[in-house]
Image (cartoon, rainbow, N blue to C red):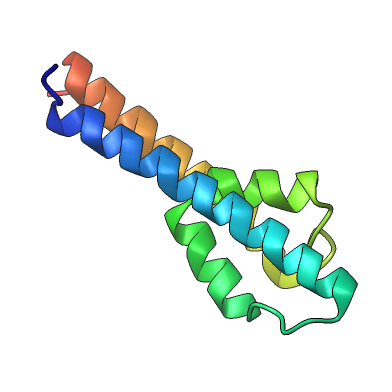
Amino acid sequence: MIITPLTAAVVLYVLANLCVFVLYGADKRRARTGDWRIPERILLVSALIGPFGAWAGMHFFRHKTKKILFFLVPVILILHIAGILYFATLLLGLIS
């Protein structure tokens, strides 16, 4: 089985989003138990890397959904979607 660079990039992107999802879940668990919390800036920076995982984690765990600063997560998600669509059209040859 040959792994192309595109396949490797997609796998890494999915893994990054899964890690971010777990990170949001871990912070929610720590919030409930009173343990040391993950700093908000770490959660936001992780959303830059894995916005699908951040958005899913926010809603699945009901975590950070009312904090104003975390309204940036859907914006980051939309930017990632736009980037994915742009690169997909490049790969398909729709844009030269």
- The residue sitting at 15% across, 26% down in the picture is 3
Is residue 94 at all visible to an observer of this figure? Answer: no
Position of residue 16 measured from the top left corner of the image (x, y, whole percent): 43, 49
Choose between 21 and 77: the one closer to the eye. Answer: 21
Quarter where residue 13 is shown: top left
Residue 60: name its quadrant. Answer: top right
Relative side of 38 to 82, left or right:
right
| 81 vs 39: above or below | above
Using the image as rendered, state which of residue 82 and residue 67 is in the foreground.
Answer: 67
Whole-percent x and y of residue 91?
Answer: 19, 22
> Which quarter of the rendered picture does the N terminus lie within?
top left
**Observer-nearest of 84 and 31:** 31
Residue shown at the point (55%, 55%) measured from the top left: 20
Quarter holding residue 85: top left
Write the residue at 46% across / 36% down: 81
Left or right for 5, reference 83: left
Residue 90 seen anywhere in this rendered image of the structure: yes
Residue 76 location in percent, x, y? Answer: 53, 53
Rendered position, 15 above or below 49: above
Give the position of the C terminus as an image quadrant.
top left
The percent position of residue 71, horizontal first and vertical second, equals 70, 60
